[in-house]
Amino acid sequence: MRTRAVTLTEQVTRQLRADIESGAYPVGTRLPTGKQLSEQYGVSAAVIREVTEHLRSQGFVETRQGVGCTVRSRTGAAGFQLPREPDIDAAGLADLYDLRIDLEGAAAALAAVRRTDDDVAALVALLERLHAHLYDGQPAADIDAAFHIGIAAATHNPYYRQLLQYLNLQLHQAVATARANTLRQPGLAEGVQAEHEAIVDAIRRGDADAARTAAVTHLQNAARRLGLTLRARAASPSPAQSSQS
């Protein structure tokens, strides 16, 4: 049987988890900053973000904005987890995009209702960064993930942000692959950028229905760019039908 190569993320996760289990980082203490961990393990900030998200999902640490990662337990208490990307086949990846469509469509709609001026400014800044790296594969993939997490943050529901952060980091390689595919077809990168802009425009205008539609359309197109076949979906009710229910 062919063995699967261990990724950098898995290597660092195992090392950091072993340090937590051994008590090198006692419960209640904070882990070093992302920059310090990057330097310690000789990996990128993106890898460290994935590592800390894996440890959070496994119950070893908790993360708080402005505070960082605090050790929560020396033993894992993992609940729901997604399979690692190398273990997902095309059908499984299509099902995960099916999940993203519902979750991120709902998040975009909620963001349109709850967003602040700062939220909109942060999303616009990410759009500008995406435009500046339109033809740069890996940087664009990292910014793309941050963009989707930024929409979740604009819901002001921390569980949306945490869940979608986990989901996007789990699918980081799929996003990178989709980005690479767009570079092979002239004009496609601009089309993806336009899809992102449509989501932000709807959120800025406070149009929940348009934000949901734009997010769903974007993710359906992203799945197609990966060559995935999505299952049939029930039609969304019109605003008039929704108001009658």
Image (cartoon, rainbow, N blue to C red):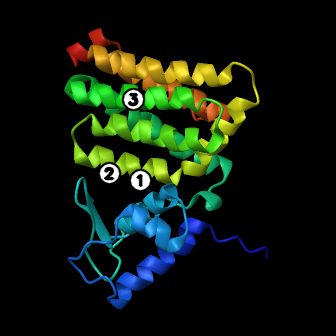
Query: What is the secondary structure assignment of the residue under circle 3?
Result: helix
Q: CA distance from mark 3 to mark 2?
A: 21 Å
The residue depicted at 44 percent of the width and 50 percent of the height is 167
Query: What is the secondary structure assignment of the residue under circle 2?
Result: helix
**Direction from residue 3 to residue 198 in the image, left or right:** left
**Direction from residue 244 to residue 230 in the image, left or right:** right
Identify the residue under disc 3: 125
The residue depicted at 20 percent of the width and 28 percent of the height is 114
The residue depicted at 64 percent of the width and 60 percent of the height is 86
Q: Residue 81 versus residue 8: which sits nearer the camera?
A: 8
Note whether residue 212 is visible. yes
Up-down: is 225 above or below 96?
above
Identify the residue under disc 1: 166
Which of the 4 quarters of the picture holds residue 26?
Answer: bottom left
Q: Amino acid at mark 1?
A: Tyr
Image quadrant occupied by the C terminus: top left
Image quadrant occupied by the N terminus: bottom right
Q: Residue 243 versus residue 103: which sits nearer the camera?
A: 103
Q: Residues within 10 Å of mark 3 (few under 14, many from 20)?
A: few
Identify the residue under disc 2: 162
The residue depicted at 51 percent of the width and 21 percent of the height is 195
Up-down: is 24 above or below 198?
below
Image coordinates of residue 207 in percent, x first then y, are 29, 15
Image coordinates of residue 54 in percent, x first then y, are 43, 64
Q: Amino acid at mark 3?
A: Ala
- Residue lying furthest right: 1
Disc 1 and disc 2 in contact, CB within 8 angstroms: yes
Query: What is the secondary structure assignment of the residue under circle 1?
Result: helix
Sequence-wise, the earlier of marks 3 and 1 is 3
Give the number of the disc on residue 240.
none
Q: Amino acid at mark 2?
A: Gln
Q: CA distance from mark 1 to mark 2?
A: 6 Å
